[in-house]
Image (cartoon, rainbow, N blue to C red):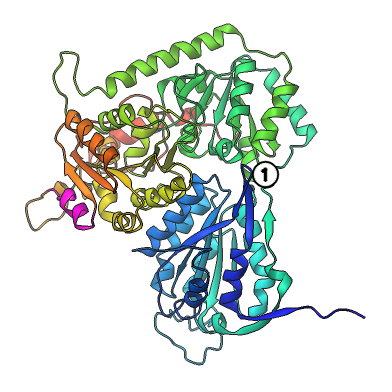
């Protein structure tokens, strides 16, 4: 005779939160909750039911109240990145605009392969009160809500129409969040009535579970094929991406490079895979890269890509490699491993690098190749030395630039401080000029290239960092444009005691897009504040006063020397500290290290400068690999 299954009667919302509270993961020998809590803004679509459930578990799953749904979800994304995808946080919002605000953050998580659980309110399943407040009606299909918009930015998507469905759906969402190949946002639409419906759930559903982060061993035939290609190389080059860090494979990467004497270059997401002073670290590659990396890429006969999706900023729209260069790609995701007819090795980076290292045996590159790499590395470092110097060769002060700000902060920061930047001109400048002091200490969000991520991401990163490195700082580089887009999490950081140091580099608008506009022959228009449609004389925002109004400390400086002194005060401060400085919007860019990048330029125009720029731009198209 079978024993009846023990059940517990809970609402659907209560069951979701209880389940999350009982999921664990082991990290460095310590068992911790897989979900570290979440971020929430309540509305009628989530406050009464999900809010009640979250209150009951507020100790196990701490909830941070955001100031904006988009930014709080960005903070959750940054948390997951800081934790190397081993833990995640959720974001919850009401129905309607609260939910649609999160779309951009979901795009960041999807593009960057980062776990983000979204618990968003939805319209009533019964439809009895329709149309309800914030409901967008579709006359031809009443099953659609704004939540359907998340299908294109989710790795897993479901709308819970009955409380029993979470018994299958919630584990499936969790498995997506922790899967190294399919990792990305998991979205659960939670209709307002169903959240409160009760169901007799089996008690076993809520049993504590410790999850294992899967490491896929590459197929031995793929290892063999990759070794054949690599051994044929006279001028091999390793491109190290963000997947190296997610796998915890930095030591294996270093061991392979050193044993076989292969130069290493880094993608934007892969910055801080090697320390700056490692002899084989030849700089960042691509559009926002370095002369050293791009020169080596152009001459390499085999390119070994590890943990990178080979985005256009890495490949220079596929112009940085010679047409006959062979590509070997080690990636946990089949889709990424097989791009551009690569020889694929599908599997975990740590396991794959160790297997390849052994299988390569005594293979070692010729000294002439490593000598060239060393020479290029030395030349690039000399350029950066000059680029970050606030004085010219005659000892005169130069106009302040992004590079100088980055150089001064880099000089004074603690080795374990974390750097956060995104979009605009700062990703290029940080990538080119930052000199890594510790592994995995740089977060430049440039997959989705989302302005506004910086301060929110800094808040999320600080929450993660504070769990282990309370004495280190999270340093945020942001431009005035991004600051004005999303700044309210300065207030969040003060309220929660999560100190950040925020560097606001004010160049009077969207200066990097103005640079692209000018470089393609166009006139400055609608990017710099002074070139916009204005009713008054343009003026600078008082960012210091604004930050202070949200409870932060702040000051405005007028030179790089003053910046250094202010940074010391920021380090000593116990709360979020904002330092503002005006930088050159026109000529203060890093000029070297760039590769070609494909952008659409007008082939017909009444402006001769636009036509000339189009011809110049297209003249480099012949270097572009056409899919092979």
Q: Is residue 543 left or right of residue 243?
A: left
The residue at the far right in this view is: 1
Q: Nearer the viewer, residue 376 or 84?
A: 84
Residue 519 in view of the camera: yes
Q: Is residue 486 left or right of residue 371?
A: left
* Number of other residues with Cα within 10 Å of mark 1, as a class: few under 14, some 14 to 19, many 20 or more: some
Query: Which contiguous range is marked in magenta?
Result: 540-551
Q: Residue 124: horizontal and vertical position, in percent?
A: 52, 84
Magenta region includes residue 264: no
Residue 182 in view of the camera: no
| Quadrant in which the C terminus is drawn | top right
Magenta region includes residue 546: yes
Q: Residue at x 55, y 29 (%)?
A: 239
Which residue is label 1 attached to?
334
Q: Residue 370: horizontal and vertical position, in percent?
A: 54, 11
Q: Is residue 170 left or right of residue 464?
A: right
Q: Nearer the viewer, residue 565 or 68?
A: 565
Q: Residue at x 42, y 54 (%)?
A: 75
| Quadrant in which the N terminus is drawn | bottom right
Q: Residue 407: horizontal and vertical position, in percent?
A: 30, 28
Tag 1, which secondary structure?
helix
The residue at the far bottom in this view is: 128
Residue 459, compared with residue 226, is above or below; it is below
């Amino acid at each position: 005779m079978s024993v009846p299954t023990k059940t517990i009667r809970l609402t659907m919302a209560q069951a979701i939160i209880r389940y999350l509270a009982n999921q664990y993961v082991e990290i460095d020998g310590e068992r911790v909750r897989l979900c570290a809590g979440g971020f929430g803004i309540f509305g009628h679509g989530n406050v009464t039911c999900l809010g009640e459930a979250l209150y009951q578990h507020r100790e196990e799953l701490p909830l941070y109240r955001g100031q904006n749904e988009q930014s709080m979800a960005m903070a959750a994304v940054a948390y997951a990145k800081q934790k190397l995808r081993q833990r995640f946080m959720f974001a919850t919002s009401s129905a309607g605009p609260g939910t649609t605000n999160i779309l951009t953050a979901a795009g960041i998580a999807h593009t960057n392969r980062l776990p983000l659980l979204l618990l968003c309110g939805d319209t009533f399943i019964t439809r009895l009160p329709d149309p309800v407040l914030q409901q967008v009606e579709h006359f031809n299909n009443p099953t659609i809500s704004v939540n359907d918009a998340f299908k294109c930015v989710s790795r897993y998507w479901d709308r819970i129409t009955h409380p029993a469905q979470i018994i299958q759906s919630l584990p499936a969402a969790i498995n997506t969040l922790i899967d190294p190949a399919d990792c990305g946002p998991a979205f659960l639409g939670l209709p307002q009535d169903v959240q409160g419906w009760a169901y007799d759930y089996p008690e076993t559903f809520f049993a504590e579970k410790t999850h294992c982060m899967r490491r896929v061993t590459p197929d031995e035939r793929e290892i063999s094929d990759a070794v054949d290609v690599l051994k044929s190389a006279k001028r091999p080059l390793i491109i190290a991406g963000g997947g190296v860090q997610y796998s915890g494979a930095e030591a294996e990467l270093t061991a392979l490079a050193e044993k076989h004497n292969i130069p290493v270059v880094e993608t934007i997401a892969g910055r801080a895979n090697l320390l700056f002073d490692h002899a084989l670290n030849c700089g960042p590659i691509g559009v926002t890269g370095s002369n050293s990396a791009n020169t080596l890429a152009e001459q390499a006969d085999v390119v070994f890509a590890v943990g990178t999706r080979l985005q256009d900023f890495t490949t220079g729209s596929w112009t940085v490699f010679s047409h006959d260069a062979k590509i070997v790609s080690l990636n946990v995701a089949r889709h990424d491993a097989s791009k551009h007819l690569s020889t694929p090795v599908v599997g975990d980076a740590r396991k794959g690098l160790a297997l390849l290292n052994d299988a390569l045996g005594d293979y070692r590159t010729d000294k002439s190749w490593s000598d060239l790499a060393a020479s290029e590395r030395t030349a690039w470092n000399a350029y950066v030395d000059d680029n970050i110097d606030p004085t010219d060769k005659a000892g005169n002060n130069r106009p302040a630039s992004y590079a100088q700000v980055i150089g001064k902060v880099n000089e004074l920061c603690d080795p374990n401080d974390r750097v956060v930047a995104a979009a605009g001109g700062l990703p290029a400048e940080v990538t080119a000029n930052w000199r890594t002091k510790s592994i995995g200490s740089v977060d430049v969000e440039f997959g989705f290239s989302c302005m506004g991520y910086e301060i929110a991401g800094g808040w999320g990163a600080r929450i993660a960092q504070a769990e282990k490195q309370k004495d280190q700082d999270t340093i945020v580089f942001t431009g005035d444009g991004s600051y004005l887009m999303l700044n309210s999490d300065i207030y969040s950081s003060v309220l929660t005691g999560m100190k950040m140091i925020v560097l606001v580099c004010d160049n009077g608008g969207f200066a990097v897009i103005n640079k692209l506009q000018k470089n393609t022959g166009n006139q400055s228009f609608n990017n710099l504040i002074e070139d916009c449609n204005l009713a008054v004389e343009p003026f600078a925002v008082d960012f210091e006063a604004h930050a202070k109004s949200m409870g932060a400390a702040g000051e405005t400086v007028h030179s790089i020397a003053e910046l250094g002194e202010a940074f010391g005060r920021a380090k000593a401060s116990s709360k979020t500290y904002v330092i503002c400085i005006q930088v050159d919007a026109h000529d203060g860019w890093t000029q070297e290290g760039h590769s070609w990048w494909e952008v659409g330029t007008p082939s017909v125009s009444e402006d001769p400068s636009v036509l000339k720029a189009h011809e110049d731009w297209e003249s480099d198209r012949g270097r572009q690999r056409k899919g092979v």
